[in-house]
Image: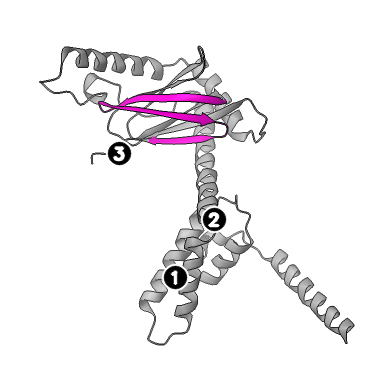
């Protein structure tokens, strides 16, 4: 009897495994089926970038189903339990990994495009004192000098020649594709959500210093040596400063739109 139970259990396991391995998720991004998307989220690798698109989508589908469900619908409880699981599930870790995978893919496409066209694909407004600082008639002479200096430096940094730009783009792409934990360098991406062009200064030990210009409502990336750094910037006149230890790819968002 025990042998029969063991055999039956083994057959069930093998059948389930075969079904799971045989599922085709090639068109999952087009799916509007809650159960199909749930199955994908259950089976997919945590680093699969499709998770970041499908997880919020299926949660919206569930909320819509619950909202329009007739009284006494037994599926409502199931939907609520699934919603709770998705919200609390592997939330922090998986969401962070999903976000990083999506950001990384966007950056790869962006820099591959720049390499193909042979020049920067960034569209930005050249800096003046007004779009570095929000100056006023009451601004001090020193404030105006700082604004003018920042504007000139931003324009100089953005105006790299084609060879410099190509070398920088190749370096960034190599870093994006590099998964070696023993690498001595790492990529840093800065997202500028403010209305002002900014320069992010990254200062490490000794003479290790980097400057990264980031257009208003844009982003920019740089490859730096791993280590401890002080990040500083002037964001629309406000001073930003933060200490960061860089041992893995880092994304920093600065400012917020006044719009």
Q: Is residue 61 left or right of residue 89?
A: left
Asked if residue 160 can be seen in this view, the reply is yes
Structure colour scheme? one colour
> Measuring 47% from the left and 84% from the top, which residue is drawn there?
74
Find residue 154 and report its image quarter. top left
Residue at left offset 34%, top offset 28%: 240
Residue drawn at (53%, 21%), measured in percent from left and top?
Answer: 168
Residue drawn at (55%, 45%) of the image: 101
Sequence-wise first label, 1 or 3 = 1
Label 3 crowding class (10 Å Cα cut-off): few <14, some 14-19, many 20+? few
Q: Secondary structure at mark 1?
A: helix
Query: Which residue lies under the disc numbered 2?
Result: 51
Whichever of callouts 3 and 2 sits on the residue coming sooner in the sequence is 2
Judge whether residue 156 is colored magenta.
Answer: no
Question: Where does the image place residue 251, in percent across and percent down from the top left?
Answer: 47, 36
Residue 185's disc is none
Mark 2 or mark 1, earlier in chain: 2
On screen, 248 above or below 171? below
Instruction: Point out residue 131 in the picture as x, y percentages from the top left corner.
Output: 25, 25
Q: Is residue 209 above or below residue 253?
A: above
Q: CA distance from mark 1 to mark 3?
A: 32 Å
- Element type where label 3 sits in the image: loop
Please state the horizontal and vertical placement of residue 243, each as a whole percent of the image: 44, 28
Q: Which residue is mark 3?
A: 256
Q: Mark 1 or mark 3, which is nearer to you? A: 3
Find out whether residue 248 is within the magenta segment. yes
Q: Which residues are magenta?
A: 226-253
Task: Judge by depth and name the residue closer to the eye, 205 or 182.
Answer: 205
Q: Disc 1 marks which residue?
A: 62
Disc 3/disc 2 C-alpha distance (Å): 27 Å
Q: Please, what is the dominant secondary structure of the magenta stretch?
A: strand
């Amino acid at each position: 009897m025990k042998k029969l139970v063991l055999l039956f259990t083994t057959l069930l396991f093998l059948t389930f495994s075969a079904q799971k391995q045989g599922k085709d998720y090639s068109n999952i991004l087009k799916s509007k089926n809650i159960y199909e998307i749930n199955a994908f989220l259950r089976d997919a690798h945590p680093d699969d970038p499709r998770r970041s698109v499908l997880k919020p989508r299926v949660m919206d589908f569930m909320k819509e189903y619950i909202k329009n469900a007739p009284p006494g619908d037994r599926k409502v409880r199931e939907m609520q339990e699934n919603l709770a699981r998705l919200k609390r599930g592997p939330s922090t870790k998986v969401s962070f990994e999903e976000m990083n995978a999506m950001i990384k893919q966007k950056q790869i496409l962006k820099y591959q495009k720049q390499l193909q066209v042979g020049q920067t694909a960034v569209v930005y407004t050249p800096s003046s004192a007004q779009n570095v600082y929000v100056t006023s008639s009451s601004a001090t002479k020193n404030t105006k000098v700082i604004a003018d200096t920042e504007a000139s430096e931003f324009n100089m940094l953005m105006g790299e020649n084609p060879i410099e730009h190509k070398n920088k783009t190749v370096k960034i792409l190599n870093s994006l594709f590099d998964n070696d934990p023993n690498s001595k360098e790492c990529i840093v991406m800065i997202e500028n959500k403010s209305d002002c062009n900014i320069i992010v200064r990254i200062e490490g030990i000794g003479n290790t210093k980097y400057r990264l210009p980031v257009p208003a409502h844009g982003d920019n990336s740089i490859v730096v040596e791993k280590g401890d750094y002080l990040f500083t910037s002037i964001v629309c006149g406000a001073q930003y400063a933060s200490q960061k230890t860089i041992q893995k790819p880092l994304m920093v968002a600065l400012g917020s739109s006044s719009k």
